[in-house]
Amino acid sequence: MNANKLLLSALAAATLASSAVAGPKFEYNDGKSSLELFQMVQFWGMTAVDDDNDDIADPNDLYVRRGRFGARGAINPDVSYTVWFAYDMIGKDGNDFMIGSPQDNTNSNKDVYIWDAMVTYKMNKEFANVTLGYFRPQVGKESITSGFHTTSYEKGLSNFFVRTHLVGRGPGREMGVNVGGLTLGNKLNYNFGLFNPNHTGITGATMKTGTNQTGTVKENAFMFAGRVAYSIGDAEMDKYKISYTTNYFGKRNGVTLAVEGAMQGETDKFESNTYYGFDVLANFGQFNASYEHNFLSRTYTDEQKAVEGFKFQDSDDVVMTAHASYNFPIAEGKQFIEPAVMWTRSDLDEGSYFGLASGYSNGTKGNVTIYSAGVNWYKDKMKEKYGIHFANFDKSEDMDGKDGAEQSVVTLTAQFIF
């Protein structure tokens, strides 16, 4: 294990954070309008522990796992907005076995892209908050919870499979409109949305010409998505929002249960694309735990199956993710040490799109089981966080016949929000 590279990543991250301050906030229009600038960044260092296939992974890597910058605020007391951008996988090795593909194969590290661009109108703060723009459909707790708020070193497979299944692109964002509420003493939270997926993984590669692979004209279908969550004990949130967290640092004693689903009709790519699932979040004092179970189904028309070279089959895939952690307060309760574990798994049908299609992120294609265990140090809660984690990736034989592989790694992580 090359400990020097891991230590270097942690020292570099700490140096960058030493001068970090909160982003500026401006108010105008007699205090009715506001604008706040913010940034977030995660640095990762990793090294392989053991490797049964020398061709699958680089033993060491240092890179920016996630980077964000943007603005948020209010247009008036009833209308808020968020616009921010992402730069991910800067410096990531293409042979790195960790989840996530590098930006490109030219090592240019120049991709900066829109992450969210949305406006929320509080038509009724309790029953009707309308969000319009480019954002995440409100299904899949891993997907709708930021990677800056996970207790494990990384989000579970539920995040990556649900996002790609519904909208085609890894960030999981799409243009849409969502209506949500938070009522019954903040215990009942619901969201229902309509989205228009346009990624070629959803619409089919020939949508621009107006024809599909069989030569017949098709219209892309809207996707409907909805989630209903109920809290027992302390509520999960005290005001409506479409962002979530996992660790309340001892301030919550409650359990949230949620059911969710999404459906889209025929496109050039498939006959139907559906999703349903459930998730549980439990916080009892310093203990935090969550579980998510996802069912992803896709069917194809006879015409699509008859196209030469078409290799997918109707499939019902299952993905599962579990997290658990415990906070130990230190420094008079201002800081926390948190042991954390994760288990996540994908079980795919024969002929599944996820098992046969190319282009998926490292660590996610085919049947995969990942478990991780490590320790986080929250120096300023989520604003300044460091971690060291062991993770094991066990990939079964891919459905296109490629051999499976197992890889264990140690990661050092450093996170800053400012």
Image (tube, helix red, strand yellow):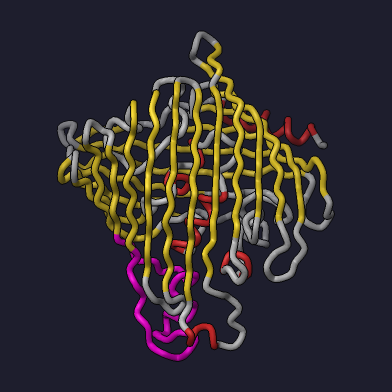
Instruction: Say left or right for 296 vs 1.
Output: left
Instruction: Say left or right for 213 vs 174.
Output: right
Above or below, 335 relative to 139: above
Q: Which residues are magenta?
A: 194-223
Query: Dividing the picture into quarters, in which one does residue 222 lie?
Result: bottom left
Taking the magenta stretch, the answer to whether it contains residue 215 is yes
Above or below, 263 relative to 119: below
Above or below, 129 relative to 13: below
Callout count: 0
Query: Dividing the picture into quarters, in which one does residue 125 lie?
Result: top left
**Rendered location of residue 258, percent (x, y):** 37, 44
Question: At 67% from the left edge and 49% from the top edge, which residue is drawn?
Answer: 98
Question: At 79% from the left edge and 46% from the top edge, which residue is drawn?
Answer: 59
Q: Quadrant of the N terminus?
A: top right
Question: At 43% from the left edge and 26% from the top edge, which residue is drawn?
Answer: 248
**Rendered location of residue 141, percent (x, y):** 44, 45
Taking the magenta stretch, the answer to whether it contains residue 217 is yes
- Considering depth in this image, is 130 or 253 the residue closer to the camera? 253
Q: Main secondary structure of the magenta part?
A: loop
**Rendered location of residue 301, percent (x, y):** 46, 82
- Considering depth in this image, is 85 or 176 the residue closer to the camera? 176
* Outermost residue, top side: 332
**Rendered location of residue 122, percent (x, y):** 19, 43
Above or below, 85 relative to 297: above
